[in-house]
Image (spheres, coloured by chain):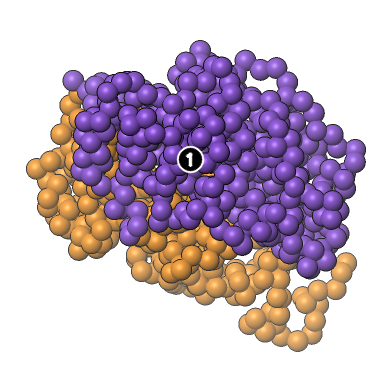
Chain colours: A purple, B orange
Amino acid sequence: MKHVDEYRNAADAHRYAEAIARIVTRPWSIMEICGGQTHSIVRHGIDRLLPDGVTLLHGPGCPVCVTPPGMIDAAIAIANRPEAILCSFGDMLRVPGNEGSLLAAKARGADVRMVYSPLDALDIARDNPEREVVFFAIGFETTAPATAMAVLQAELRALANFSLLVSHVLVPPAMEALLSDPASDVDGFLAAGHVCTVVGYEDYTPIAQRYRIPIVVTGFEPLDLMQGLYMCLRQLEEGRHEVENQYSRSVRAAGNPAAREAVERVFAVRPQEWRGMGSIAASGLGLRPHYARFDALERFPAIAVGAESESACISGEVLRGVSKPCDCPAFGAACTPEHPLGATMVSSEGACAAYYRYRRQPPVREAVA
Amino acid sequence: MTEGPEFTLQCPLPDSGHERIELAHGSGGLLTHRLIEEVFRPAFAQSPDDLTHDGAVVDVPGTQIAFTTDSYVVRPLVFPGGDIGSLAVNGTVNDLAMCGARPLWLSAGFVIEEGFLVEDLRRIVASMRDAAQAVGVRLVTGDTKVVERGHGDGLYINTSGIGAVVASQPISPRQVQPGDVVIVSGDLGRHGMAVMAARENLGFEPPIVSDCGSVSAPVLRLLDEGIDLHCLRDLTRGGLATALIEIAESAGVAMELEAAAIPVSDPVRGACEILGIDPLYVANEGCFAAIVPESEAARALSILREFDSAAIAVGSVRSGGAAGSVALKTMGGSYALDRIAGEQLPRIC
């Protein structure tokens, strides 16, 4: 497949591994932000191609993993109302809140629908004028423009029965929160390519300078990741701390101005609760007052967003890169994709799910005599 | 008693004027009779006695028969490359083929939702007839039930099939030996992605077309040519990965697959990439895995390629390794494939 196969060439990946081995003189810890990158790294065994001492830490960039359980509970409470149709992305539906998941609510009779785009939810609202259609809007800067477009379209079409439960999050404030955490051990970042496709990477320069940390905007294919790691490690070895763009076939410095403009028009930055990480200042998006009529929490005033309840799950540490999934005593035993204790085991972009799928058993080349 | 067409004085027209399935079509009365006479018998009966009795009485040539059943609940009922009718015939025919059997007879049970358009039913029944004719299987008995509106998804079909076993050796996971080669008969993932794209209106260009079809002919050819088939498995729900895990577990062997060899067409790969879905776990409806001794692999492959040029050897049965494991070799080593919990759902971004 063109534009993918070129970036999965094993021989080129091994050449990058050799180049990395030649320049690395001491241990480094690099965090990839995005859950899609984590999945690709573990699936293709990218971490196994790196020299000893280079550690990959998996970041908080799994959109459903960081959605706070209280929000999921609120989504379920809305879905349980007979007049409501609750729509969200497929992966969101099976993540448990404090009590159960949207899929479980659906099995009990709630009208929960999987959509591929928030614009699909608008069509559902148009086709069901007697129902209240609520889109559970989650994700990073990548999904926020589509949510913003849905709001603008709903206004244009004068849809009175459409609203949003908004839990959008922003990457740069989370990176700063990680860097301010004394438990954090991050020497360099691979920034999430798709997020930067939307918002560009100008916001990263102050972070790189303030924390003296290299940030390389990186794609998702094996060669993207190898090249991004090479660029990041070369900066570390040379004592530089700059923002570089590996993913230049997709990312421009200023991102996608039309998408940014739509987000800016509809949303204002607000403090945001992250699952397992607590509240982070200026790390979320909320509807601007002009669009408050599309806020599901305004439309259903009886629905409250509760706090996260105590849990044995260490997903907060996993999301902050402090622990690896296999450090958790429950991993693969009490906690499996079938019976997950936390979101990182449920989502296809969660680090625990990636480790469970690709790393639960010892590598077969070692197991086979 | 409500007035129905049975009390009109005119002769009933061949098309009795019912646009939609009503509960009475499942009553066993006149409307049921009409449905059978006007929709099912014209499609399937080959002699005046066919489909007139509670069951079919058939001659069994030879002694060993294969017998299977499957229910079809696909949504949407019509998708690029097929519909629930062709699926219901081919799916059961393929199950018989996996037993090394030539398909002979099918039964069909229809559960129809009140309000279903008779015209749509005709189209689906015609598609069943065409699929059955193409493979030379006869639909000899059936049943119709109508459920109240809202209690079904338009139409469900169950088919059972009887076939005559032509394989001289048993075909089962127990025959699988270390050293055997794993061959797939075509490219993977088309049915599952075609149905998902049609259901969710994803509008991929070009559209993904289901591989829905019979694999009876290639299997019978392999048997005619005397290929020693250790095991066959159609790659329906759960896809190649789940099928091979099941075989490896039953056989108590380890398998190793080459990720680079696994055939997936560009449109399917593209759709899977976009949605974050692994084609190894996506359903197929016209594709199977054949596990054959290494000495037979080249010949088996050249036969299968006459039917589908995408047929390819994707891996082998290992002499060591953990029993029941299926490893996939990628660029950074290999990992063990596992059953996935629940459905594959599209990722967020």
Q: Which quarter of the rendered picture does the C terminus of chain A lie within?
A: top left
Coordinates of residue A153 in the picture (x, y in percent): 73, 64
- Residue B49, horizontal then vertical, whole percent: 49, 68
Furthest-right residue in view? A302
**Location of residue B98 with respect to B12 vertically, above or below:** above
* Residue where numbered disc 1 is placed: A191
Q: Position of residue A131 (x, y in %)?
A: 83, 55
- Judge whether B128 appears above or below A117 on screen: below
Instruction: Give the residue drawn at x 56%, y 58%.
Output: A256
Q: Is residue B172 visible in this depiction of the protein?
A: no
Residue placed furthest toward the left: B295
B3 on left or right of A73? right
- Give the image location of residue A199, x and y in percent: 57, 51
- Crowd tier of the residue under label 1, counting other residues whose Cα lies within 10 Å: few below 14, some 14–19, many 20 or above: many
Q: Residue at x 51, y 12 (%)?
A: A329
| Residue occupying image coordinates x 47% and y 53% | A251
Q: Of A269 and A131, which appears nearest the observer?
A: A269
Count the numbered circles shown.
1
Secondary structure under tag 1 reads strand
Question: Does residue B111 appear to the left or right of A359 in the view shown?
Answer: right
Q: Label 1 sits on what residue type?
A: Ala
Q: Judge whether A46 appears above or below A154 on screen.
A: above
A319 sits left or right of A52 in the view: right
For the point 16% across and 44% down, the residue is B228
